[in-house]
Image (tube, helix red, strand yellow):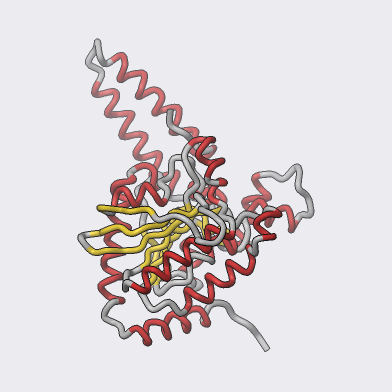
Amino acid sequence: MAYYLDFEKPLEEIESKIEELKKIGEDFDISPEIKRLEKKVKELRTEIYSNITPWQRTQIARHPERPYTLDYINYITNDFVELHGDRRYGDDPSIVGGIGKINNKSFMIIGHQKGRGLKERISRNFGQPNPEGYRKALRLMKLAERFKLPIITMIDTPGAYPGIGAEERGQAETIATNLMEMSRLKTIIISIVIGEGGSGGALALSVADRLYMLENSVYSVISPEGCAAILWKKTTDLTTDDFNKAAESLKLTAKDLKSFKIIDDIIPEPIGGAHKDPEAMSRRINEYILKTTEILKTKIMDKLIDERYKKLRKIGAYEE
């Protein structure tokens, strides 16, 4: 059964009617009526998605049917071999990574994985990595550097796990180490925000030569809910209006971040979101990866690292 967000409820009613008519259509020819309703759905979806607010875009980024890292890996790679463990503590399933071929070229692909269904989501900690997840990611990046493999990172996390155990095992230090090490890795790095890009949990995989965002993804230092709770000093009775104001203030959409030159480009999504056509979305991601790799591999490595550093230094502004 399809999952509908609050602002998609008008679509649910019509699409439910279409499903009912299709069952009746097994005995009667009502295809003209079905086609009329399908056209209406298409027009209504286009209208709804042409006026999306930042808070609504956050909801799309979290959509439970949205493709995750492993979905994209399955669509765009051949011979993918997942690698496990940080060689210090354990394996964190909220970050997945391994070597796969895209158009017969080998890449190291690493990303957050939230999981499908409650059981898998719990096992993957809802995509919130512990320190061992980030150490695993860095171990795989170092492996990629050794074998001169381009690195692709896919970002989709509410943030790093804030539990006591994670803090005891050095969560902040691990994220800081990833930022430092990624800034000087001697290989191509392409990062793509495919869903939520939350706080340091996202930053730890997004120091890159090129940073892209899917059209309906978000990338921010804090969630709209967390921001609203801090700004209005309450943890209960928060409303949609509060979340809307917070999301608008955070400037967390791909359009906002491109205007600030924090990201390099926006990858368009099918109308209705990436989950409406995962194959088409995967093809677009594939095109960006291959095109960007061809551009970056023409650069001398020292120049690439220098440009990566300068790119980071340009983020933000200050006044004296």
Q: Position of residue 117 (x, y in %)?
A: 49, 35
Q: Residue furthest top?
A: 27
Q: Position of residue 129 (x, y in %)?
A: 56, 55
Quick one: 62 or 147, which is closer to the camera? 147
Q: As drawn, is 283 to the left or to the right of 152?
A: left
Q: Residue furthest bottom?
A: 320
Q: Position of residue 195 (x, y in %)?
A: 47, 53
In the displayed structure, 123 sits above or below 231; it is above
- Could you tell me which quadrant the N terminus lies in? top left
Q: Residue furthest left?
A: 104
In the displayed structure, 67 sits above or below 265; it is above
Q: As drawn, is 305 to the left or to the right of 132?
A: left
Q: Residue at x 61, y 63 (%)?
A: 221
Q: Residue at x 25, y 18 (%)?
A: 30
Quick one: 129 or 315, which is closer to the camera? 129
- Res 284 quadrant in image: bottom left
> What is the total number of numbered labels drawn onto the structure image?
0
- Could you tell me which quadrant the C terminus lies in? bottom right
Q: Position of residue 240 (x, y in %)?
A: 64, 45
Q: Residue furthest right?
A: 233
Q: Residue at x 36, y 42 (%)?
A: 276
In the displayed structure, 188 sits above or below 269; it is below
In the displayed structure, 224 sits above or below 178; it is above
Q: As drawn, is 217 to the left or to the right of 189?
A: right
Q: Residue at x 66, y 51 (%)?
A: 225
Quick one: 82 or 70, which is closer to the camera? 82
